[in-house]
Image (cartoon, rainbow, N blue to C red):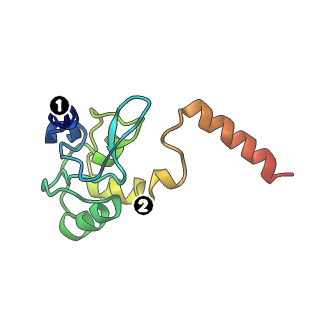
Amino acid sequence: MSEELSAATSYTEDDFYCPVCQEVLKTPVRTAACQHVSSGHPTFKCPLCQESNFTRQRLLDHCNSNHLFQIVPVTCPICVSLPWGDPSQITRNFVSHLNQRHQFDYGEFVNLQLDEETQYQTAVEESFQVNM
Protein backbone atom coordinates (compact mmCIF):
# COMPACT_ATOMS: atom_id res chain seq x y z
CA MET A 1 0.00 0.00 0.00
CA SER A 2 2.79 2.48 0.87
CA GLU A 3 4.51 1.64 -2.44
CA GLU A 4 1.32 2.54 -4.31
CA LEU A 5 1.10 5.83 -2.40
CA SER A 6 4.72 6.76 -3.05
CA ALA A 7 4.38 5.81 -6.72
CA ALA A 8 1.29 8.01 -6.98
CA THR A 9 3.06 10.98 -5.38
CA SER A 10 6.50 10.63 -6.96
CA TYR A 11 7.49 13.44 -9.31
CA THR A 12 10.16 13.85 -11.95
CA GLU A 13 12.01 17.01 -12.97
CA ASP A 14 9.52 17.36 -15.83
CA ASP A 15 6.78 18.06 -13.27
CA PHE A 16 8.65 21.21 -12.20
CA TYR A 17 9.97 22.39 -15.57
CA CYS A 18 9.19 26.03 -16.38
CA PRO A 19 8.30 26.61 -20.04
CA VAL A 20 9.16 30.30 -19.66
CA CYS A 21 12.73 30.17 -18.37
CA GLN A 22 13.30 26.54 -19.45
CA GLU A 23 14.74 25.62 -16.06
CA VAL A 24 13.66 23.18 -13.37
CA LEU A 25 12.13 25.10 -10.47
CA LYS A 26 14.23 24.81 -7.30
CA THR A 27 11.52 25.54 -4.70
CA PRO A 28 8.25 24.78 -6.50
CA VAL A 29 4.80 25.56 -5.14
CA ARG A 30 1.69 23.97 -6.68
CA THR A 31 -1.41 26.16 -6.45
CA ALA A 32 -4.58 24.45 -5.32
CA ALA A 33 -6.97 26.06 -7.80
CA CYS A 34 -5.33 25.21 -11.12
CA GLN A 35 -2.43 22.94 -10.10
CA HIS A 36 0.00 25.39 -11.74
CA VAL A 37 3.54 24.94 -10.46
CA SER A 38 5.61 28.00 -9.71
CA SER A 39 8.57 28.88 -7.60
CA GLY A 40 8.25 31.18 -4.63
CA HIS A 41 10.89 33.45 -6.14
CA PRO A 42 11.25 33.52 -9.91
CA THR A 43 14.65 33.08 -11.44
CA PHE A 44 15.68 34.01 -14.95
CA LYS A 45 18.16 32.98 -17.61
CA CYS A 46 20.30 35.68 -19.19
CA PRO A 47 19.31 35.68 -22.88
CA LEU A 48 22.72 37.12 -23.81
CA CYS A 49 24.95 34.40 -22.33
CA GLN A 50 22.46 31.71 -21.19
CA GLU A 51 23.70 31.77 -17.57
CA SER A 52 20.74 30.94 -15.35
CA ASN A 53 19.17 31.17 -11.88
CA PHE A 54 19.26 34.95 -11.62
CA THR A 55 16.78 36.89 -9.52
CA ARG A 56 15.54 40.06 -11.16
CA GLN A 57 18.13 42.18 -9.34
CA ARG A 58 20.97 39.75 -9.97
CA LEU A 59 20.10 39.61 -13.69
CA LEU A 60 20.13 43.41 -13.79
CA ASP A 61 23.52 43.52 -12.01
CA HIS A 62 24.94 40.71 -14.18
CA CYS A 63 23.92 42.39 -17.43
CA ASN A 64 25.22 45.80 -16.35
CA SER A 65 28.56 44.23 -15.41
CA ASN A 66 28.98 41.79 -18.31
CA HIS A 67 26.82 42.91 -21.23
CA LEU A 68 26.49 46.69 -20.96
CA PHE A 69 27.55 47.37 -24.56
CA GLN A 70 26.14 44.18 -26.08
CA ILE A 71 23.16 45.22 -28.20
CA VAL A 72 21.40 42.11 -29.42
CA PRO A 73 17.65 41.68 -30.00
CA VAL A 74 16.27 39.12 -27.53
CA THR A 75 13.12 38.29 -25.60
CA CYS A 76 13.10 39.62 -22.04
CA PRO A 77 12.65 36.69 -19.62
CA ILE A 78 11.24 38.98 -16.93
CA CYS A 79 8.56 40.40 -19.23
CA VAL A 80 7.63 36.92 -20.45
CA SER A 81 7.18 35.72 -16.85
CA LEU A 82 4.54 38.37 -16.14
CA PRO A 83 0.86 37.48 -16.66
CA TRP A 84 0.62 39.94 -19.55
CA GLY A 85 3.97 38.84 -21.02
CA ASP A 86 4.25 38.22 -24.74
CA PRO A 87 6.90 35.61 -25.64
CA SER A 88 7.06 36.97 -29.20
CA GLN A 89 8.01 40.51 -28.05
CA ILE A 90 11.60 41.26 -29.01
CA THR A 91 13.70 43.77 -27.07
CA ARG A 92 16.33 45.45 -29.27
CA ASN A 93 18.64 46.56 -26.44
CA PHE A 94 18.14 44.17 -23.54
CA VAL A 95 20.43 45.88 -20.99
CA SER A 96 18.82 49.26 -21.61
CA HIS A 97 15.40 47.62 -21.35
CA LEU A 98 16.33 46.07 -17.98
CA ASN A 99 17.52 49.40 -16.65
CA GLN A 100 14.41 51.24 -17.83
CA ARG A 101 11.70 48.65 -17.10
CA HIS A 102 12.94 46.37 -14.35
CA GLN A 103 14.48 48.51 -11.63
CA PHE A 104 11.75 47.21 -9.29
CA ASP A 105 9.74 44.04 -8.79
CA TYR A 106 6.21 44.26 -10.15
CA GLY A 107 5.13 41.99 -7.30
CA GLU A 108 5.82 44.82 -4.85
CA PHE A 109 3.28 47.05 -6.59
CA VAL A 110 0.63 44.72 -7.99
CA ASN A 111 -0.86 41.41 -6.94
CA LEU A 112 0.03 39.15 -9.85
CA GLN A 113 -2.57 36.61 -8.67
CA LEU A 114 -5.46 39.02 -9.39
CA ASP A 115 -6.83 39.84 -12.82
CA GLU A 116 -6.54 43.37 -14.22
CA GLU A 117 -10.16 44.36 -13.51
CA THR A 118 -9.92 43.34 -9.83
CA GLN A 119 -6.67 45.27 -9.45
CA TYR A 120 -8.26 48.31 -11.06
CA GLN A 121 -11.24 48.17 -8.70
CA THR A 122 -8.92 47.78 -5.69
CA ALA A 123 -6.87 50.80 -6.80
CA VAL A 124 -10.02 52.92 -7.19
CA GLU A 125 -11.28 51.88 -3.73
CA GLU A 126 -7.90 52.61 -2.13
CA SER A 127 -7.73 56.02 -3.82
CA PHE A 128 -11.04 56.99 -2.19
CA GLN A 129 -9.68 56.02 1.23
CA VAL A 130 -6.49 58.05 0.80
CA ASN A 131 -8.34 61.23 -0.18
CA MET A 132 -10.79 61.20 2.72
Determine which quarter of the picture holds residue 74.
Answer: top left
Residue 122, given in percent of the width and then of the height, sits at: 67, 40
Work out which residue is located at the far bottom of the displayed protein and give it: 65
**Mark 1: amino acid:** Glu
Residue 104, given in percent of the width and then of the height, sits at: 45, 59
The reply to whether dot 2 and dot 1 touch (C-beta < 8 Å) is no
Residue 62, given in percent of the width and then of the height, sits at: 24, 66
Answer above or below: position of 120 versus 56: above
Work out which residue is located at the far right of the displayed protein and give it: 132
Assess disc 1: are there few (<14), some (14-19) or many (≥20) residues with their C-alpha within 10 Å of its C-alpha. few
Q: Which residue is mark 1?
A: 4
Q: Which residue is mark 2?
A: 103
Please report the residue visible at 20 percent of the width from the left and 40 percent of the height from the top. 17
- Quadrant of image for the N terminus: top left
Earlier sequence position, callout 2 versus callout 1? 1
Determine which quarter of the picture holds residue 60.
Answer: bottom left
Determine which quarter of the picture holds residue 95.
Answer: bottom left
Closest to the camera, between mark 2 and mark 1, is 1
Work out which residue is located at the far front of the displayed protein and give it: 1
Mark 2 and mark 1: span between their CA atoms?
A: 48 Å
Answer above or below: position of 84 versus 99: above
Residue 6, given in percent of the width and then of the height, sits at: 19, 37
Please report the residue visible at 42 percent of the width from the left and 34 percent of the height from the top. 32
Viewer-proximal residue among 70 and 85: 85
**Mark 2: amino acid:** Gln
Viewer-proximal residue among 26 and 101: 26
